[in-house]
Amino acid sequence: MRLLLLACLRAQTGNATTAARIQSHLHDAGHICVLKDASRCESLTEIANLTSADQFDAALAIHLYKGGRNLQGSRIPFGIIFGGTDINEDIRSEEKRRVMGAVLREARFAVAFTTEMKELAAAEWPDARKKIYVQYQGIRTTPTETFDWYRFLQNADIPADTDDLHVFLLICGLRRVKDPLYLVDVFSDWHRKEPSVHLGIIGPAVDPLLTTEIKEKIKRAPGVHLLQEMPQDDLHAAMRRCFAVVNSSISEGMSAAILEAMDLNIPVLARNIPGNAAIIKHKDTGLLFSDPQEFVALSKSLMNDPIMEREIVTRAKDYVKKHHSWECERKAYQNLVLRLQ
């Protein structure tokens, strides 16, 4: 089949990573899958022309609103993959909810990353329950073997010669829903008392206004650093050398960065929200915090208890291998697209 895959394709964002993964799965099954950036579509007419000019047999869209609205009324069959903010955030807007409901009615199937996400969608659109499938994200990490950690620290203005250095990485697109400033004040206060702890914020500048705010804020926040975006393989290599990966989002579908950290045997500290709690069992496969002060307390306990750290990363790695298999995800999408024939 010739498949169109619509998603917001900003580099190093969750949607772009998911889209590339699904494209790979479909190519391996012999399909042609073309990615189209939903955020750069000039108009709905542009998509209508693509889907009516015999270029594609079927389509997929990631995010029920941002991607899916472009397929409303499409002449070709399509499926939807929930993004996370569509079900967690956009559903609160009456207009967006109306559009998403219409898209879901037309879709042959929809994919939710978690059972919780499926239940939220089914509660809003009960008639769609039977067409919503749960498929956890598949994870595969590919860290660059030649990655220069010391140059990375130097570029970040983190002193590499610090005794007992502990680097925490917050990996996210710089936008409000990721709340990258949530921990800045408390982390900087902690750094003033313990200069060996550093927080690096890394990700694409999705929201230019927020990015400017972050730059201004961290000028007055010693120990907190805004880092340059880097290719996925280098990012995995940096994660492998850091002490812990952090997630401070207000809302998540399913954080690939959390799962990648688990796969790399790196502990995760994540804000206690439904999307994170769906993949982290507190003090079992990671640590969940409810406020900045609890983040610092849990970080200290992790630093002071290497046995707990080792047990957490071992269980987290086992969890990812069991529930987030690349191969299982591949088979699932290869089977689902057959419903579009």
Image (cartoon, rainbow, N blue to C red):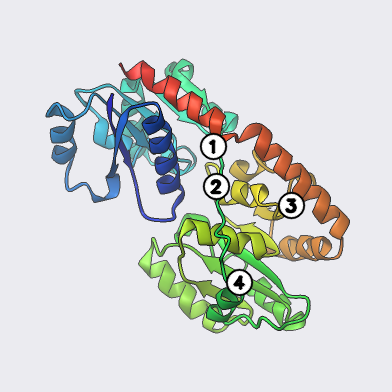
Number of the front mark, 1 or 4: 4
Location of mark 4 (residue): 149
Nearer the observer, 321 or 283: 321
- Where residue 287 is drawn, which disc sits there? 3
Q: Residue at x 31, y 26 (%)?
A: 102
- Bin the neighbour count of mark 4 within 10 Å (Cα to Cα): few under 14, some 14-19, many 20 and up: some
Location of mark 1 (residue): 137
Image-based side of 201 in relation to 291, left or right: left
Q: Secondary structure at mark 4?
A: helix
Nearer the observer, 213 or 111: 111
Residue 8, horizontal then vertical, whole percent: 34, 47
- Which of the two labelled residues, at mark 3 and mark 4, occupies the earlier sequence position? 4
- Which of the two labelled residues, at mark 3 and mark 2, occupies the earlier sequence position? 2
- Bin the neighbour count of mark 2 within 10 Å (Cα to Cα): few under 14, some 14-19, many 20 and up: many
Kindly indicate whether the residue at mark 2 contacts the one at mark 1 (C-beta within 8 angstroms): yes
Q: Amino acid at mark 2?
A: Ala
- Which of the two labelled residues, at mark 1 and mark 2, occupies the earlier sequence position? 1
Q: Amino acid at mark 4?
A: Trp
Q: Residue at x 57, y 81 (%)?
A: 154
Count of numbered circles on the image: 4
Q: Amino acid at mark 1?
A: Gln
